[in-house]
Amino acid sequence: MQRLGWRRPTALPGEPCALGSPNFYTQVVATEVGLLEMARRATKTFRTVYDIAHPGMLEYKAFHFEGTSIRFPTLLIKRRMPEPVAPRIVRGCRENQEVELDLDGDSELGFD
């Protein structure tokens, strides 16, 4: 990604990041020339790094950290549908005991 003009992340995911980004990033001047360069860089990155040959292949996935889906209907890009979460398991649990599931539907079960 650096060879395509992106700057390296300044922190690992989950680490504090006062300046820069935990992701690859770039800075451009918001002029016609700067925005054209940004469009070229993004297009080349999609094609060479992510193997996206056509804009119709793009899709987005957006959600709140608690798992609530977020929609962007004016984005005009296909939304990746969230995977269904398994139903809560209640059979075999003690009365008033709740089983918490994480975002991908797993749960840590404790045994007495």
Image (spheres, rainbow, N blue to C red):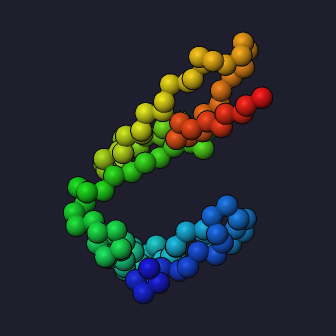
Residue 82 against residue 88 in the figure, above or below: below
* Left-right relation of 25 to 40: right
Please identify the quarter of the rendering in which residue 73 is found.
top left
Q: Is residue 56 among the parts visible in the rendering?
A: yes
Q: Is residue 67 among the parts visible in the rendering?
A: no
**Residue 98: x percent and y percent?**
69, 22
Residue 83 against residue 50 in the figure, above or below: above
**Residue 7: x percent and y percent?**
53, 80
Q: Residue at x 55, y 79 (%)?
A: 8
* Left-right relation of 42 to 18: left
From this viewpoint, which residue is outermost toward the top? Answer: 95
Q: Nearer the viewer, residue 70 or 109?
A: 109
Residue 15 against residue 26 in the figure, above or below: above
**Residue 90: x percent and y percent?**
60, 18
Q: Residue at x 43, y 33 (%)?
A: 84
* Left-right relation of 109 to 89: right
Position of the N terminus, as image quadrant, is bottom left
* Left-right relation of 30 to 52: right
From this viewpoint, which residue is outermost toward the right? Answer: 112
Please identify the quarter of the rendering in which residue 20 is found.
bottom right
**Residue 35: x percent and y percent?**
39, 73
Position of the C terminus, as image quadrant, is top right
Please identify the quarter of the rendering in which residue 101 is found.
top right
